[in-house]
Amino acid sequence: MERFDLVILGAGAAGLFCAGAAARRGRRVVVLDHAARPGEKIRISGGGRCNFTNRELTRQNAAERFVSENPRFALSALSRFTPADMIARLDRAGIAWHEKHRGQLFCDGKATQVVEMLVEDLRAGGGELRLGTSVAGLERLGEGFVVETSGGPIAAERVVVATGGKSIPKMGASALGYKIAESFGLALVETRPGLVPLTFAEQDLARTAPLAGIARAARVRRGKVAFDEDLLFTHRGLSGPAILQISSYWREGDALEIDLAPGRDIAAELAQIRAEQGRIAIQTALGRLVPEKLAQFVVAEAGLAGRLADQNNRALERLAGQVHRWQVRPVGSEGYRTAEVTLGGVSTAELDAKTLEAKRVPGLHFIGEVVDVTGWLGGYNFQWAWASAWAAGQVA
Ligand code: FDA
């Protein structure tokens, strides 16, 4: 049987990065992936430019920017391999980057440069990459493991599971990592799509359909969590960064409260127009403050009609409330087909925060998205992939 010091399952961001780190330590490493190409999600990420990290991430805000049953779990790995460390890696590889919005760093050129850098690191350390190789199972063999693959069994001293989440099945996502965890009796946190557009029920869609295509800055709130970002009305419901962010906190049955004109006082602005041109229709007046179709929708939702001059202050407040505190109850999400990430996964309670090794299965590590650690939109998920991979790569 073939033997390696370390077998890594999954040639995505985490698997490739971990392989490079372990190979540099002189470990004999092989990375297995059923896909035809490595790092496919890196390639398509950030609109093809890979938002590879976020430099706003600090030890102080990390627990808030990652969703997990134990948000503090990620701090150890995140503080030992930081956004500055990843920037230094790209700089050394000569990959130019720029900052876009709120600390989000993107490559100037194609995201494939990052994949090439990771594969090059792996090869420079003498590691092997085997693509088109499916993994049928993993079992204990003495102190080590046997990996059953389409190319025959491979014996390994240690195994790192970096098979990612369930998002975008047509790109090779599978539940292998979760199945392996289960087969070793490790607890899983229920998985669900995250960073995903939300959908409306038929009766809501009938009312919002004319709004499809409208994009605007908004504040979207669910309970105590709120995001100030762009929102997009779609033919199925809502999307845009504000919705993707809140989707990771949203549960079926929850209502969202949306401010469609954050930082403004629509009641005061309407009162001003009323003082100057009270004869215009209320929806014409609101149409000067927000897109016309949105104004029509809001006026209808508030149950108002007629001239602006005929509306008392209470009516204007009601209308403004509809703009600033629109209550909407999505019925679902677009699911794993379009979700950028998978929430939940291998329970952090099962893993050592420093090494990502399963406490009850020595030699078996879980890194990246397969773990119950999910970041905000904006480079946080790749930073978790790099940091958890680096942590495991120092010992595996
Ligand atoms: P990843 O999914 O990258 O890799 C898992 C690997 O395992 C894949 O190569 C897969 O083929 C392989 N695999 C799975 N099952 C297998 C099996 N049964 N046998 C063999 N191999 C198997 N994040 C961010 O920070 N910035 C961004 O710009 C974006 N943009 C973005 C866009 C889109 C469209 C998506 C879908 C996602 C993002 N993300 C992102 C999220 C980010 O891509 C994601 O969090 C990381 O890729 C996770 O890295 P992993 O290595 O854990 O999994």
Image: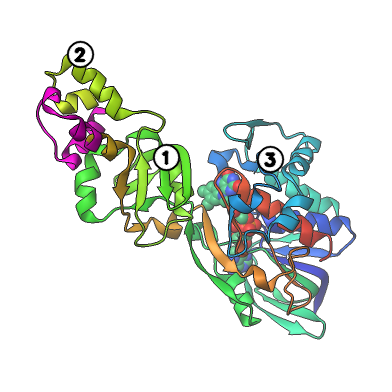
Q: Is residue 326 left or right of residue 178?
A: left
Q: Earlier in the sequence, mark 2 or mark 3?
A: 3
Q: Identity of the amino acid at label 2?
A: Glu
Q: Quick one: label 3, few (<14), some, or many (20+) residues within 10 Å?
A: many
Label 1 element class: strand
Work out which quarter of the rendered image holds the C terminus and state it: bottom right
Between residue 29 and residue 341, name the one nearer to us: 341
The label nearer to you, 2 versus 3, is 2
Q: Is residue 262 above or below residue 116?
A: above
Snapshot colouring: rainbow
Q: Earlier in the sequence, mark 1 or mark 2?
A: 1
Residue designated by label 1: 219
User: Is 302 inside the magenta-drawn segment?
Assistant: yes
Indicate the position of residue 118 as horizontal and vertical percent values. 74, 49
Residue stretch in magenta:
290-318
The label nearer to you, 1 versus 2, is 2
Of helix, strand and loop, which mostly describes the magenta segment? helix
Which dot marks residue 205?
Answer: none
Q: Identity of the amino acid at label 1?
A: Arg
Separation of residues labelled 1 and 2 (CA atoms): 30 Å
Q: Quadrant of residue 94?
A: top right
Q: Is residue 191 left or right of residue 65?
A: left
